[in-house]
Image (cartoon, rainbow, N blue to C red):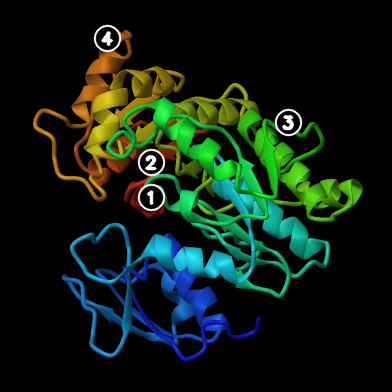
Amino acid sequence: MSSPFAGRRLWFVGIGGAGLSAYAQLARAWGAEVGGWDKTRTPYLEPLADVAVEISPEPVAPEGWEAVVSSAYPQVPGLRRRELLSELASARLPIVVAGTHGKGTTAAMIAFVLREAGHDPAWLIGAPVPQLGSNAGSGTGPLVIEGDESDRTVFSLPARIAVVTNIELDHHSEFASLAELEAEFDAWLVQAEHVVRDAPPFEGPLALPGELNRRNAGSALATLELAGVERAEAEAALARFEGTGRRFEVHELGDVTLVDDYAHHPTEIAATIAAARERFPGRTLRALFQPHLYSRTRHLAVELASALAGADDVTVTDIYPAREEPIPGVTGKLVVDALSDRGVLAAWTPTVEQGAERLRRRARSGDVLLVLGAGDVDRAASLLRG
């Protein structure tokens, strides 16, 4: 199993992303020559510092390479990312973690505990995992994959153990209804050798706050037992797990605390605010939120407002479009208006820079600043540090 990709030259279009950078690392470890293109140089490229990467405004796919294309660039011909991921998964029947919320954290928990327990895992996770050193690993043991339902990728993956954290409709341009999404999951799960679903929350000590993380840990623990890790050993390692990048990532900025979090769905936002209340009782919470996707904002503006209303002070930027084209009349102001309908006076700051500056002006000693969203709102963290 040391080189199942030997002899292939794979060029990753969008190599700086969380997903494709991980696939490139594992494909290279398994024998492929890799290179790629992206618009900008990202931290995900650090483990690939010694491979050919072209940075330019438009996608590049040179001759002589097999292109592997991010879902963000549907116009570029080549192997779709789901197709390559299926190849990687088939090379070593994996543990696949799926679900609307918590799948990245749960997958990282499983990989971390497997490594701590001496099982030498490989992993592909769509976020940095500081304790593992990278979003990808190439050990000789079980392969742990964070599966993505946003473009149906996860439903093409074989799985020895299939893990479902939860199911909510989050990608309205991909699925017509929650019933369609649930049917896709049901069809996928019947093909797995083992299924972990509706696991009870873990009640032991955790470094990560909040009910969602207790549920993530419960799913991880059930999976680890199936993978051959003794429960007591798994529980002890879970207590040492400190999380993934931008999942309740805490930074102390003098006399205020910054929490940077990927939360972009109402359930995730509410869970992050609840976790902040648990971790920092009695402190003022000031939230900066960047909506993600026009379709999600159009369908869930009221629910987003309801979740954000749990903070003491709310600032909203314009929408991060990701892969979508604008929808007339759909902007971040829909969330601000929905907050107003709830009696919450929220601020509208179209740019991340304006939002960070508002947080800076309003912050008082002891406040907790929450930066929320899945787009480029993470830039606010460095702006606030400066």
Q: Nearer the viewer, mark 2 or mark 3?
A: 3
**Quadrant (top left/top right/bottom left/bottom right) for the N terminus:** bottom right
Instruction: List x then y, in percent, for residue 267.
Output: 48, 27
Of labels 2 and 3, earlier in sequence is: 3
Secondary structure under tag 3 reads: loop
- Report which residue position mark 1 lands on: 378
Of labels 4 and 2, earlier in sequence is: 4
Q: Is residue 250 left or right of residue 237?
A: left
Q: How many marks?
A: 4
Distance from the alpha carbon under mark 4 to that under mark 2: 22 Å
Q: Amino acid at mark 1?
A: Asp
Q: Is residue 161 above or below residue 29?
A: above
Q: Amino acid at mark 3?
A: Pro
Secondary structure under tag 2 reads: loop
Location of residue 227 (image quadrant): bottom right
Q: Amino acid at mark 2?
A: Gly
In depth, the one of 88 and 299 nearer the eye is 88
Distance from the alpha carbon under mark 2 to that under mark 3: 25 Å
Q: Is residue 210 visible?
A: yes
Tell me whether circle 1 and circle 2 mark residues in contact (CB < 8 Å).
yes
* Mark drawn on residue 201: 3
Q: Is residue 367 above or below residue 141?
A: above
Distance from the alpha carbon under mark 1 to that under mark 2: 8 Å
Tell me whether circle 4 and circle 3 mark residues in contact (CB < 8 Å).
no
- Report which residue position mark 2 lands on: 373
In depth, the one of 93 and 240 nearer the eye is 93
Q: What residue appears at the point 54 percent right and 36 percent down from the top-left corner? A: 186
- Report which residue position mark 4 lands on: 341
In depth, the one of 187 and 172 nearer the eye is 187
Of labels 1 and 2, earlier in sequence is: 2
